[in-house]
Each structure stands twice: as C-alpha cells, then as structure tokens.
Image (cartoon, rainbow, N blue to C red):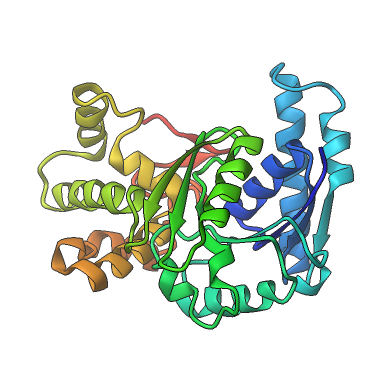
Amino acid sequence: MSGQLGVIGAGTMGAGIAYVSATAGYDVTLVEVDPERGNAAGSLIDTWARRAVDRGRAEPELPEQVGRRLTIATSIDDIPHGADVIVEAVPERPELKRDVLTKAETREPKLLGSNTSSISIDSLAEGLNRPERFCGLHFFNPVYAMRLLEIVTGGRTSNDTTAASLAFAERLGKDPIVVADAPGFATSRLGNALGLEAMRMLESGVADAADIDKAMSLGYKHPVGPLELSDMVGLDVRLDIARTLQEAYGDRFTPPQLLIDKVERGELGKKSGSGFYRWQDGRKVEE
C-alpha cells in the first residue's frame, strides 16, 4: 500500500511522524527550511530504522525501504499536489502554524492535520478555505513507540475527515481517541495540570524530583513521573502549553518560575541534556 504524505517541520515530532509513516508504506516528503536540521532528521530516521532491525522488531530491509520512501525538502511546494495527508509539526506558535497551514492547503491534501498539543483547532482553521478537511493529529513522543493518536475535531471538521483520520491512525498502527476542540484537548490539559503542580511542589521544597516522580510511579502506576515526563516532552514545550492553557483557563495553569528559569537557561530536558534530571545519549543519568 502506497500513498503520499507530507510532514512540515523536522524536529523530533516531525521526524517521528515521517518515520512511522514511511514504515507504514507512505512516500513521505519531510519539509524543513533549515537544510542542516533536515539532514539531521534524515540521519535520525535512519538510526531508528537500523535500531529496530538490531532489536529484532523489523526486517533487515527496513532502513533501505524507509530511505527510498523519504524525501527531505526545504519548501512546502515540494509536497506532491493532492497528497493523502499533510501534517504540520512546527513549534507551538499560533501565527506560525496558521501561516504553515495556509501554505499547506494550497497543495490540496485530502486530509490536513496539525500536531499541536494545545492550540485550538478552530483557531488554527482561521483563513483556511477547506476547514472541513482539517483536524488535530496529536502524536506522542517517541512517535515510533507511543500508540496513542489524539484526533481533535474542530467545529467545521467533517465526518469524512474524522473517518479519514481514524483510517490513517489504523494504518500507522496507532490507537486513536477522538476529542472535541478545546485548548489543551484531553491529554495536554491533564498532563500539564499534573506536571505544573509537581514543579510547584519541587519549587517549594515538598520533596526532591526523584521522590515526587516515585510517588506517582509507585502510588498511581504511572510509567514515569510528571517531572521526568516533562523532561522527555521538553520544558520549552511544557512552557508554551502552560501559557496557552493559562490564557484559556486562568491562573491554575500559570507556569511556575522554576520552569520559566530553566527554559531561559536552556535547560530543556532530554533534548538539551539537562532539565529536572541529567540526560546523556537519550538516557537519564542515574545520580
């Protein structure tokens, strides 16, 4: 089964979406305006494919197949006209996303999605000529391992688009949920509420990061605690989401000064090597 898919933005999430789509048989155009960043994403995708083979989770030909299906481009115009799916995966900045989505729509995809984790889908649909073809397609990091796909329907999202999104999720091997449009949707709203409160506890000296995380892991059977998860998501991403939710829901989502300070210092979590924990080669360093 083939098909054409475009991904705009070659950060961790965009690269992950491109990878799982290529493994599902799509011919993928990954758009990144920074050629160096685009090449780095291509190398990362190749690493994921080879690692899957080494771990016995894929056939030996997977890296070659993924490489053949993947094209790194620098312009949205390089996405084939009439592609089956285009997913926007640029940073959580509403104006940036609207601009990218408006340009992506000119390629007339059958399904247009945003990987936003918190911004209103109806807000992002402003200026689109075919908002009925648009919805949220919120993936989770790492995309190749996390089964959840949060499909967010806007007020003008058609039933056909929802059905196409569910079919897309099935082809990628994802387990989808469908939620109505609201800032933060279901996952980011709940996840940030817990993460921000954990940061406030750390900030006020209730307990250290490891013990706060252990409380949720052992007491509530969360796979990882809220501070470690924040490091994995990215503290800059957490801060962007918190500010979006604060604007929508009020002061209960006000970001703690601890989070603001860490982001300003470049302590972004796993991707920078330092956050609430230290990280090396993608793994948490045990103290």
- Where residue 149 sits: x, y (%)? 50, 43
Image side of residue 53 versus residue 162, left or right: right
Q: Nearer the viewer, residue 219 or 212?
A: 219
Q: Residue furthest top?
A: 56
- Where residue 165 sits: x, y (%)? 57, 49
Q: Nearer the viewer, residue 26 or 162?
A: 162
- 245 above or below 56? below
Image side of residue 189 versus residue 13, left or right: left
Image side of residue 183 versus residue 6, left or right: left
The number of numbered badges drawn on the structure is 0
- 98 above or below 215? below
Q: Which residue: 71% across, 28% down?
A: 51
- Where residue 31 sits: x, y (%)? 74, 64
Locate the C terminus and report the quarter of the image it occupies. Answer: top left
Q: Which residue: 66% across, 50% down?
A: 15
Is residue 279 visible to the viewer in this orientation of the structure?
yes
Q: Which residue: 54% across, 67% down?
A: 132
Q: Which residue: 27% across, 27% down?
A: 217
Q: Nearer the viewer, residue 168 or 245?
A: 168
Q: Residue furthest bottom?
A: 127
- Where residue 53 sits: x, y (%)? 76, 23
Image side of residue 221 versus residue 82, left or right: left
- 163 above or below 153? above
Is residue 90 visible to the viewer in this orientation of the structure?
no
